[in-house]
Image (cartoon, rainbow, N blue to C red):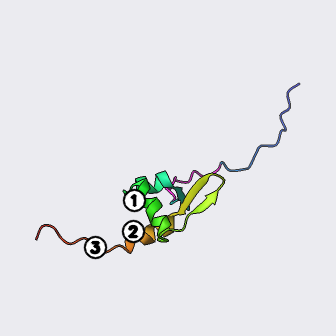
Amino acid sequence: MRRTSEPRSTAQPPIATPMVAARPIAVTIAEASALSGLSRSSLYNLIAEGHLCPRKYGARTLILFDELDAFLRGLPLAKDASR
């Protein structure tokens, strides 16, 4: 016997939200190297000199994205080579 009085769902389907590229909170040394253009050795030197303060999670060494960004933005501007 077929039931005809089943309640219909009134729930709306979820609204699709566009994917927005989120800035990471922290990056690995390899990711920091790729993002900044600095070599892994340079990053480890900056850590040893106290310019960057890494975080550890197990065996992973992480650098806060905002800290890397602030360091790079604090570097002096290059002189215009076209003059």
- Neighbours of disc 1 within 10 Å: few (<14), some (14-19), many (20+): few
Which percent across, then down, holds residue 70?
44, 72
- The tag earlier along the polypeptide, 3 or 1, is 1
Magenta span: predominant SS is: loop
Specify start and end residues of the magenta stretch as a single range.
14-22
Given residues 56 and 15, the one toward you in this image is 56
Q: Amino acid at mark 1?
A: Ser
Identify which residue is drawn at 85% across, 38% down.
Answer: 5
Q: Amino acid at mark 2?
A: Leu
Q: Is residue 69 inside the magenta stretch?
A: no
Which percent across, then down, holds residue 12?
68, 50
Structural distance between the alpha carbons of marks 3 and 1: 15 Å
Marking on residue 21: none
Identify which residue is drawn at 41% across, 52% down.
Answer: 34
Pointer 1 and pointer 2: residues touching (CB < 8 Å)? Answer: yes
- The tag earlier along the polypeptide, 2 or 3, is 2
- Neighbours of disc 3 within 10 Å: few (<14), some (14-19), many (20+): few
Q: Amino acid at mark 3?
A: Leu
Given residues 66 and 51, the one toward you in this image is 51
Assign a secondary structure to mark 3. loop
Pointer 2 and pointer 3: residues touching (CB < 8 Å)? Answer: no
- Neighbours of disc 2 within 10 Å: few (<14), some (14-19), many (20+): few
Which percent across, then down, holds residue 6?
83, 39
Identify which residue is drawn at 55% across, 64% down.
Answer: 54
Would you name the residue on which mark 1 appears? 36
Would you name the residue on which mark 3 appears? 77
Quarter of the image that includes the N terminus:
top right
Assign a secondary structure to mark 1. helix
5 lies left or right of 67:
right
Marking on residue 72: 2
